[in-house]
Image (cartoon, coloured by chain):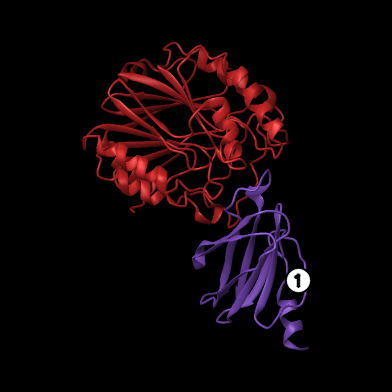
Chain colours: A red, B purple
Amino acid sequence: MQHTDRRDFLKLAGLAGVTFTAGLFPGLKASAQMAGDFHFVQISDTHWGYKGPANPDAEHTLEKAIATVNGLSNKPDFIVFTGDLTHTTEDGAERRARMKRFKEIVSALNVKDVRFMPGEHDAALDKGVAFKEFFGATHYTFDHKGVHFVALDNVSDPGAKLGDEQLAWLAADLKQRKPDDRIVVLTHRPLFDLVPSWDWTTADGAKAIDLLMPYTNVVVFYGHIHQEHHHMTGHIAHHAAKSLIFPQAAPGTQPRRPPPLPFDASLKPLGTRDVAMSSTVTMTELPVTKG
Amino acid sequence: MNRRHLIALLIGGSAAGGAVRLARAAAPGEIEIQASKFDFTPDIVKVKRGETITLVLTSIDRIHGFKMPDFGIRTDIIPDEERRVTLTPDRAGSFVFFCDVFCGDGHEEMSGTLVVDG
């Protein structure tokens, strides 16, 4: 597997037609709005139910972000939540109560095509049982305006594996694609070894990347690490999203994975992301609030 | 000081605010590490470079994982079972180990450090 630093990433990304757009708000730049055949919003790591000093605003942050997304002048075609919808609890009843309340809150989104994926906080303690009750399958595909989306579950196995069965399912799905099809992969954890000593990886993620490697137009969006991050494995770009609960330290900055970063009342380290898709992929980071 | 005592004393020390605990005396070359939500005890293990050691891993509550990527080590730790991992550190330094089986709210902080002197 080839790893690339940020400078190389930008070079490769430019060659691959991937661009970044400065995250100005309110309102996306007109050029960004017009760049894509369509655009969607990625929301990640809401951790509904979290209570702690890393976010004293936790009961309101999600609602603020929803108001911001609802205020986009150019409404996204759909919204995808890339995992850790809820904060973990060992109490199954409480887990379901959190999922129920989360679902009620996000029903305020004015875009009704909403896709959900689990994170380990939602699914690892019960292997996704409660998640499926509320949100359906933990891995699936869908197609939108010529782009093939693949949502992978690397969290329901508490050992952070996709597993042979899901990998076989992925292989069978990819066999139906042409080599230059546009493919977007959605995951919670990074598929590649971002920081193995912090467990920021997927145990068998390299097998998924190997399956994707023959396809020339693949991009991966994920969450888990609570910050914007960009990485290339060969020609495949991987983009991590900010969270809506608390930021984490930059990858590998300490030997042992540190606790969440201190709360920033401005909420600037948090946010969502607009992704415009055409022949290029244009990302615009959105703040939690317009103000 | 006999070897059993020496090994017990090799376990412990403090770095990065880690808890300092002495494990009970183990057989020569063995270092016992107990996993529980959400700690390893001890979480700082000191050894010498080139010394062959066996980590004796147990859990008192639920399944945990033990992963030390720098030495290519990983195993599940299952209650009422002993998992034994033998290694001979060939380089000095501090090497992180952590639980890689999600075990609840606190899992992310469940880690420790193998300190190899010399």
What residue is rendered at 65% in x and 46% in y? A259
Side (left or right) of B9 relative to A24:
right
Q: Which amino acid does label 1 sit on?
A: Ala
Percent x, y of residue B116: 60, 74
Is residue A290 in sight in this rendering? no
Label 1: chain letter: B
Percent x, y of residue A281: 33, 29
Looking at the rendered structure, the secondary structure element under dot 1 is loop
Question: Is the C terminus of chain B in the top left, top right, bottom left or bottom right quadrant?
Answer: bottom right
Percent x, y of residue A202: 47, 49
Q: For the residue carrying disc 1, how many other residues have a C-alpha within 10 Å: few (<14), some (14-19), or many (20+)? A: some
Q: Quadrant of residue A96?
A: top right
Of B104 and A44, nearer the camera is B104
Of B53 and B44, nearer the camera is B53
What residue is rendered at 72% in x and 33% in y? A51
Side (left or right) of A271 relative to A182:
right
Side (left or right) of A188 relative to A180:
right
Q: Work out whether A165 lies above or below A44.
A: below
